[in-house]
Image (spheres, helix red, strand yellow):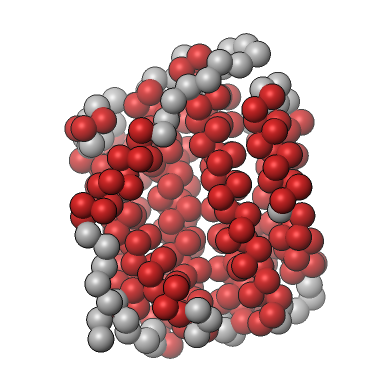
Amino acid sequence: MLRRLPTATSLAVSLAGLFAGVAFASGPGAIDPEVANRHTNLAKQQSMLVQQIAKSACFATLGVNASAQMRYLAGAFDLYSRTNQGLRNGNAALGLVEEQHPNMIQALDEVARDGARWTAQATAAARSRGVVSDQAMITLVEQGDRLLPLTQALGERAGRTYGANNGVPLAQTLRIDLAARQRLLSQSMAKSFCLVAKGYRADHYRDELAEAVTLFDTSLGALIDGFESFGLQAETEPTRLARLDAVRDAWSEIRPAMLAVAGGATPSEDQIASVAWANNVVLSLSNAAVFAYETAPAS
């Protein structure tokens, strides 16, 4: 029996909450708006990396380009670790300055403290000379799911902290938030798809996949066509529009398989192989779209 996907109305409520959650907090002092946007972008990137690590471990245990998947995992964890340190202490190569805001330091402390078990498991997986075991993968998934609310809170706090008091227009912060959400969803969907293929908590991850697919579609539409209720106009700047169109084109290649599995189908070997490869294309293009909003004023 096919599963019922979330309605457009439920997605509109979710998206409204995403926009309404953007508010601004004062801090020790204003910094360059592009540096502020980089902090917001990379703080939000951490959640995506948590999902990417779990996804790569899952596809590795399925035997889908396992050695490449383990390299993706190690690279994602290295970036996660360097970004965590950079968000706290600054990192010129990443475009980050030392954190001075007490609320951001608190959020980073919470991620470090409550994510300690996940960090230990991810460290072991990244240093592994072979494919992780099914149990190690499941631990990464479960601990990552517990860590995710904290990394998402870190990203949301960064948006509030590095917003208006650094001269960043509200529309730009909203677009960075939405584009970063797309980046996260690309990995969340692939992870859920893979876990259904593994047969691990299939009903739960089908539901997560269904919600993520619909939110991805709605959020991408908002970035391209605008979201009038919150004052976002349709995208017209050529570079950003081209990047969003590229995301849409790449997403269209795997969207039917995602929808089918979310609706109750069992993924075929060809679909698994296609999603395992093409989700990385969607991620790369989504990431480029986020960075496009760092430097140019958003309408």
Q: Is residue 25 above or below residue 254?
A: above
Q: Residue drawn at (45%, 80%), measured in percent from left and top?
A: 202
Residue 26 percent across, percent down from the top left: 56, 15
Identity of the residue drawn at 76% across and 31% down: 89
- Seen from the viewer's position, the closer of residues 210 and 130 is 210
Q: Is residue 158 left or right of residue 291?
A: right
- The answer to whether any part of residue 164 appears in the image is yes
Question: Residue at point 44% right, 59% down?
Answer: 186
Q: Is residue 101 above or below residue 72?
A: above
Q: Position of residue 109 (x, y in %)?
A: 73, 39
Q: Residue furthest top?
A: 29
Quadrant of the image containing the N terminus:
bottom left
Query: Viewed as shown, does residue 257 lie left or right of 82?
Result: left
Q: Horizontal and vertical percent for residue 55?
A: 55, 68
- Residue drawn 66% across the image and 68% down it: 140
Vertically, is 71 above or below 282? below
Picture mark count: 0
The answer to whether residue 253 is visible is: no
